[in-house]
């Protein structure tokens, strides 16, 4: 018999949601077969069987689990009786609470005969915002996750029950309930993903002594080239794609900017320029990673970013999409933004920010000319990078962006 324990999927979450079992209870599975789908605060991940065996599931879909927790066993045969476990699956908001360690939690709440599984984070949002369960079930999905509930929030209407309570002034009990519900309505519950973002930001501010430098860049030529490449490559190429490519080409000259801070007065060199890029389409902030940006063609980098935006719409990132960034580029490209200070993420020494291009009128000889300008900022861990180094790095990045044909030829 082999115990199937929840692996550690990232460094930010202390618990995950068991979204779906990919193999039936009692089914024979092989080593390496995907058997369960776990949801972290940012991604979903298929977890594979560690050995051959007959699956005996110990935790229901929709329950929360922790890294290291036993959620299933792999038996040598269907006839082998499951051994008693020395530990009980987690008893958090989705865990088993009836005192039987081998029996999974009911997958649906009491009185719910729909058969639809609602994960604990999803149910928290449903209750916090008063969403009618009929609307949830109308989605037609077997498992309702927090991202599904977030889709409904934009069209949320007041619950009839709340409206009735609020107008029942002749009933003291109803009035008290309405007052309590009104108080609850004043609070906005953060999504699970936003809670994790908050934790990372707090850690960064607490642990990293960051400094910041910014530089204006003439992006007139690079934007023109990007439009031409979009037509030729038949994929969207914009300023963010160009910045990722240009930054990736600076790894060899500025290794500290891509290094991982280590214990003591040293940092580990990065083998490749893996650039994390912020993506936010209204369903939470994600930072997927473009691998080896310095050596890959611009068309591949552009394809990666298009794919990231599509994946963000469905909320179906995998943990491997979000891990391993050596430097981060934060995008602030809404019209009117002229300045943005990124945070330095733990495990990195710096982060770039990019603002929206804006029109400027500048003197050109005896006359004037119109150009497009964007601000590129650099927040950096001052323990590893000094202001002079930051200015040189930004200067090289500006030179590359202002002479895009040359840097693209040099770097592929």
Image: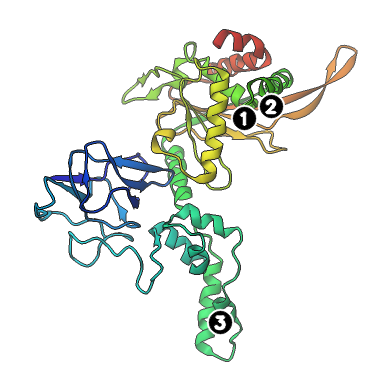
157 lies above or below 344: below
Measured Cα–Cα span from mark 3 to mark 1: 49 Å
| Residue drawn at 57 percent across, 8 percent down | 410
x and y percentages locating residue 131 in the rendered image: 52, 66
Q: Nearer the viewer, mark 3 or mark 1?
A: 3
Q: Which mark is residue 374?
A: 2
Q: Which mark is residue 165?
A: 3
**In the displayed structure image, the side of residue 267 where residue 70 appears, left or right:** left
Q: Earlier in the sequence, mark 3 or mark 1?
A: 3
Measured Cα–Cα span from mark 3 to mark 2: 53 Å
Q: How is the image coloured?
A: rainbow
**In the displayed structure image, the side of residue 78 where residue 224 appears, left or right:** right
Q: Earlier in the sequence, mark 2 or mark 1?
A: 1
Q: Earlier in the sequence, mark 3 or mark 2?
A: 3
Query: Could you say whether the residue bearing mark 3 is in a helix, strand or loop?
Result: helix
Q: Residues within 10 Å of mark 2 (few under 14, many from 20)?
A: many
Q: Residues within 10 Å of mark 3 (few under 14, many from 20)?
A: some
**In the displayed structure image, the side of residue 308 where residue 120 appears, left or right:** left
- One can see residue 195 in this view: yes
Q: Residues within 10 Å of mark 1 (few under 14, many from 20)?
A: many
Measured Cα–Cα span from mark 2 to mark 1: 7 Å
Query: Could you say whether the residue bearing mark 2 is in a helix, strand or loop?
Result: strand
Of all residues, the one furthest to the right in this rendering is 366
**In the displayed structure image, the side of residue 179 where residue 291 appears, left or right:** left
Find residue 86 and report its image quarter. bottom left
| Residue drawn at 72 percent across, 25 percent down | 373
| Residue drawn at 61 percent across, 61 percent down | 155
x and y percentages locating residue 390 in the rendered image: 54, 20
Q: Which residue is mark 1?
A: 354
């Amino acid at each position: 018999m082999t115990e199937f324990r929840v692996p550690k999927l990232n460094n930010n979450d202390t618990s995950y949601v068991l979204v779906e079992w990919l193999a039936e209870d009692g089914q024979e599975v092989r080593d390496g077969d995907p058997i369960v789908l776990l949801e972290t605060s940012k991604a979903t991940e298929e977890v594979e069987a560690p050995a051959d065996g007959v699956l005996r599931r110990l935790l229901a879909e929709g329950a929360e689990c922790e890294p290291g927790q036993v959620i299933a066993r792999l038996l040598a045969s269907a006839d082998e009786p499951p051994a008693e476990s020395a530990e009980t699956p987690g008893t958090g908001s989705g865990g088993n609470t009836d005192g039987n360690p081998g029996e999974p939690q009911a997958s649906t709440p009491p009185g719910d005969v729909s058969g639809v599984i609602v994960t604990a984070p999803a149910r928290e949002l449903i209750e916090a915002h008063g969403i009618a369960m009929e609307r949830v079930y109308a989605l037609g999905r077997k498992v309702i996750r927090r991202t599904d509930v977030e889709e409904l929030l934009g069209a949320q209407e007041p619950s009839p029950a709340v409206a009735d309570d609020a107008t029942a002034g002749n009933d003291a009990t109803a009035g008290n309930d309405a007052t309590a519900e009104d108080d609850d309505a004043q609070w906005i519950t953060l999504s699970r993903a936003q809670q994790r973002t908050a934790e990372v930001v707090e850690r960064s501010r607490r642990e990293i002594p960051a400094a910041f430098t910014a530089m204006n860049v003439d992006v007139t030529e690079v934007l023109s080239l990007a439009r031409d490449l979009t037509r030729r490559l038949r994929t969207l190429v914009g300023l963010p794609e160009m910045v990722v490519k240009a930054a990736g080409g600076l790894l060899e000259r500025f290794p500290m900017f891509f290094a991982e801070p280590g214990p003591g007065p040293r940092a580990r060199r990065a083998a490749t320029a893996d650039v994390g890029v912020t993506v936010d389409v209204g369903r939470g902030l994600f930072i997927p990673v473009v691998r080896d940006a310095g050596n890959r063609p611009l068309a591949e980098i552009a394809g990666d970013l298009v794919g990231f935006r599509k994946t963000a719409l469905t909320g179906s990132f995998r943990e491997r999409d979000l891990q391993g960034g050596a430097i981060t580029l934060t995008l602030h490209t809404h019209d009117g933004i002229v300045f943005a200070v990124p945070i330095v993420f733990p495990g990195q020494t710096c982060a770039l920010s990019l603002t929206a291009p804006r029109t400027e009128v500048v003197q050109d000889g005896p006359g004037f000319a119109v150009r497009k300008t964007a601000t590129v900022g650099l927040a950096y861990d001052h323990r590893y990078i000094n202001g002079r180094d930051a200015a040189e790095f930004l200067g090289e990045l500006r030179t590359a962006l202002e002479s895009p044909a040359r840097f693209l030829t040099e770097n592929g």
